[in-house]
Image (cartoon, rainbow, N blue to C red):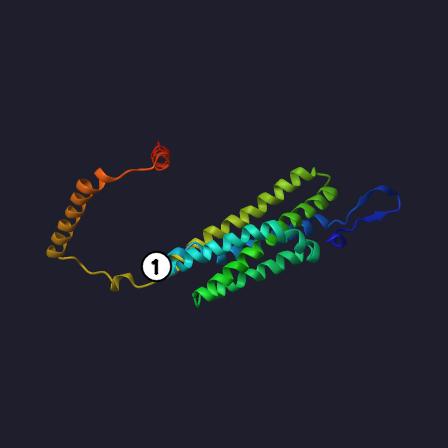
Amino acid sequence: MDSKFQPVKTEDDDERPVYGPNESWRIWKNVLVIGFAFMIHFTAFWGASNLQSSINSEAALGTFTLAAIYGSLILSNIFLPVIVIRWLGAKWAISLSFVAYMPFIISQFYPRFYTMIPAGLAVGFGGGPLWCAKCTFLTIVSEAYSKVTGISSDIVVTRFFGVFFMFYQFSQVWGNLISSAVLSSGDASSTVVAPNSTTLNNASAIFEDIVNITTSKLYPTLRLHPLQRLIQSLVYTWPA
């Protein structure tokens, strides 16, 4: 990476290096490309992972997959980033970590425990180097941009990270929009059945029975743990 930002020295300036006129644009291009790549990549990932507990609810497959992802991510963040970044460099560590997410996307076409759990583990072990390499890359190009423009490196780091996370947060927007479009793409009119008066009366009677049972039998025997009461009070008072 250092070879991309070599200064161009002139004969009459030996104290401060002079960079080429396109260096600042090249650095910005790298920041925009990595932000766009993360947006596309995590659009696919979040669109799939946000629905795991719903679309793969049988035998809690989706829940166990998410547990495998974030459990392995904890171990990955502790042990792998230094080794992988030192071995490959920040740029190639990002590229290799992207590949670790691909089995998870592919396994959605055949969701089984022996496909989803290993794919989830691959995501977790790739996630640690991915995010640490991203931070390393943005910090390095921020220092280079600071030398090119004379702007404080603290300001440049903040600016670059802000631009990156703008792209990254869009992945949640596009991922949820695509998931919503796919799940609602069926012909809803073919499944709608107009209820008749008998059906409505039966439903009303069932609802009244449920309410009576709940109020007369459940509440008198219900005992909440103090922690549950605290959580409920926080939840109920938060909107106020």
Q: Is residue 7 left or right of residue 182?
A: right
Which residue is drawn at the image coordinates 54% and 60% (left, top)? Answer: 122
Placement of 59 over or under 14, stated as above or below: below
Which residue is drawn at the image coordinates 50% and 59% (left, top)? Answer: 120
Spot occupied by residue 97 in the image (x, y as percentages of width and height): 60, 58
Residue 46 seen from this side: no
Q: Is residue 107 left or right of residue 199?
A: right
Which residue is drawn at the image coordinates 87% and 43% (left, top)? Answer: 14
Spot occupied by residue 206 in the image (x, y as percentages of width and height): 15, 51
Spot occupied by residue 151 in the image (x, y as percentages of width and height): 70, 38
Q: Is residue 193 left or right of residue 237?
A: left
Image quadrant holding the C terminus, namely: top left
Kindly identify which residue carries mark 1: 184
- Mark 1 lies on a secondary structure that is loop
Image quadrant holding the N terminus, namely: bottom right
Q: Is residue 231 left or right of residue 170?
A: left
Depth check: 95 or 37 in front? 95
* Residue situated furthest bottom in the rendering: 110
Residue 198 seen from this side: yes
Depth check: 231 or 195 in front? 231
Name the amino acid, label 1: Ser
State the image quarter where residue 160 is shown.
top right
Depth check: 140 or 216 in front? 216
Mark 1: few/some/many CA within 10 Å (<14, 14-19, 20+): few
